[in-house]
Image (cartoon, rainbow, N blue to C red):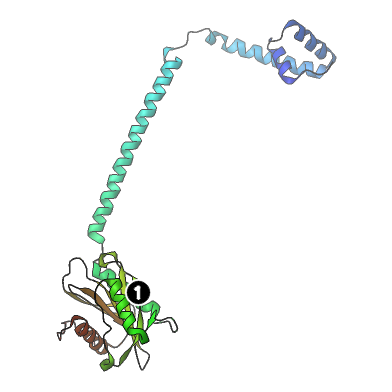
């Protein structure tokens, strides 16, 4: 006869076969001593387990282990954990939100600081270029100023800095701070020594308060001013007095006044 499957042999050891199947397995085991020894070992293990745990199996099941009661307890515990997790998430979110809100109140830089930093960064990037220093060349000045005026939604002219030794190279449109309309115009000038200065202009800030500020960032010096129409940052690496002269010329022409600011550059 063919050898019984392992499942059949285990069922034989557990006394779960009918008479016919049992006789067939007994005949097989009689002809196969090794299989008979293994099945006998299984039988002894099963007897030992029954002897050890049969008394406990006869005891009534505790009420706390009733399936319905266990399911209810698990559901209750799961709901409690969800509520605790939700509460913790809300508290953490409130804490983080309050923290970031407080941080924005305390640490947020002034809009002028952002504009000056943007102006200096744009200056550093484009004054180092030769062929692509500007997007629209000075030969198309009318188109340049008309285009930038439309994008900034405020009239813009290119100051004449010939008296200060500088000629217009051209200009470009740049992304700007959201507070200033999201766009900025950069005009670039160059003198005979190939020194370059840039003028960074945006629409007016929401507060529209006049402001004047001089800042040094890295190797660049920046003169920032704002009025009810625009903000302007003149950036360059000229000696202090020369930088002041150029900045004052830009200020007078873009404001249409002869007024000079009180800002003083270091000598």
Which residue shows up at 68% across the image and 12% down it?
14
Q: Is residue 254 above or below residue 26?
A: below
Task: Name the side, left or right, on which 31 lies relative to 45.
Answer: right
Quick one: label 1, few (<14), some, or many (20+) residues within 10 Å?
many
Q: Is residue 85 above or below residue 205?
A: above
Q: Position of residue 75 (x, y in %)?
A: 40, 24
Question: Could you say whether the residue bearing mark 1 is in a helix, strand or loop?
Answer: strand
Which residue shows up at 79% across the image and 18% down it?
35
> Where is the N terminus found, in terms of image quarters?
top right
Q: Position of residue 136 (x, y in %)?
A: 38, 81
Task: Name the side, left or right, on which 212 lies relative to 17.
Answer: left
**Observer able to see residue 78:** yes
Q: Is 102 or 65 nearer to us in this picture?
A: 102
Q: Quadrant of residue 105?
A: bottom left
Q: Is 131 or 61 nearer to us in this picture?
A: 131
**Observer able to see residue 197:** no
> Where is the C terminus found, in terms of image quarters?
bottom left
Q: Is 5 or 224 nearer to us in this picture?
A: 224
| Residue highlighted by disc 1 | 173
Which residue shows up at 26% across the image and 65% down it?
179
Q: Position of residue 109 (x, y in %)?
A: 26, 65
Q: Quadrant of residue 210?
A: bottom left
Q: Quadrant of residue 10?
A: top right
Q: Is residue 116 above or below residue 178?
A: below
Farthest top residue?
19
Which residue shows up at 16% across the image and 70% down it?
209
Q: Is 213 or 208 nearer to us in this picture?
A: 208
Could you tell me how many numbered marks the image carries?
1
């Amino acid at each position: 006869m063919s050898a019984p499957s392992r499942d059949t042999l285990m069922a034989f050891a557990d006394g779960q076969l009918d008479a016919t199947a049992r006789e067939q397995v007994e005949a097989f085991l009689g002809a196969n001593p090794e299989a008979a020894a293994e099945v006998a070992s299984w039988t002894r293990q099963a007897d030992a387990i029954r002897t050890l745990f049969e008394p406990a199996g006869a005891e009534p099941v505790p009420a706390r282990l009733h399936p319905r009661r266990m399911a209810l307890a698990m559901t209750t515990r799961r709901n409690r954990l969800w509520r605790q997790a939700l509460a913790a998430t809300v508290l953490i979110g409130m804490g983080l939100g309050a923290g970031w809100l407080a941080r924005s109140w305390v640490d947020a830089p002034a809009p002028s600081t952002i504009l000056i930093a943007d102006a200096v960064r744009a200056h550093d990037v484009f004054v180092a270029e030769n062929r692509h220093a500007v997007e629209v060349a000075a030969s198309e000045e009318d188109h340049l100023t008309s285009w930038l005026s439309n994008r900034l939604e405020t009239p813009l002219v290119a100051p004449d800095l010939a008296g200060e030794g500088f000629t217009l190279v051209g200009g470009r449109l740049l992304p700007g701070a959201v507070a200033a309309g999201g766009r900025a115009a950069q005009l670039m000038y160059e003198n005979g020594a190939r020194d370059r200065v840039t003028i960074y202009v945006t629409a007016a800030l929401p507060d529209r308060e006049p402001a004047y500020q001089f800042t040094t960032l890295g190797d660049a010096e920046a003169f920032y001013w704002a009025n009810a129409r625009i903000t302007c940052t003149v950036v360059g690496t000229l000696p202090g007095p020369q930088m002041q002269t150029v900045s004052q010329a830009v200020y007078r022409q873009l404001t249409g006044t002869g007024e000079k600011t009180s800002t003083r550059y270091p000598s």
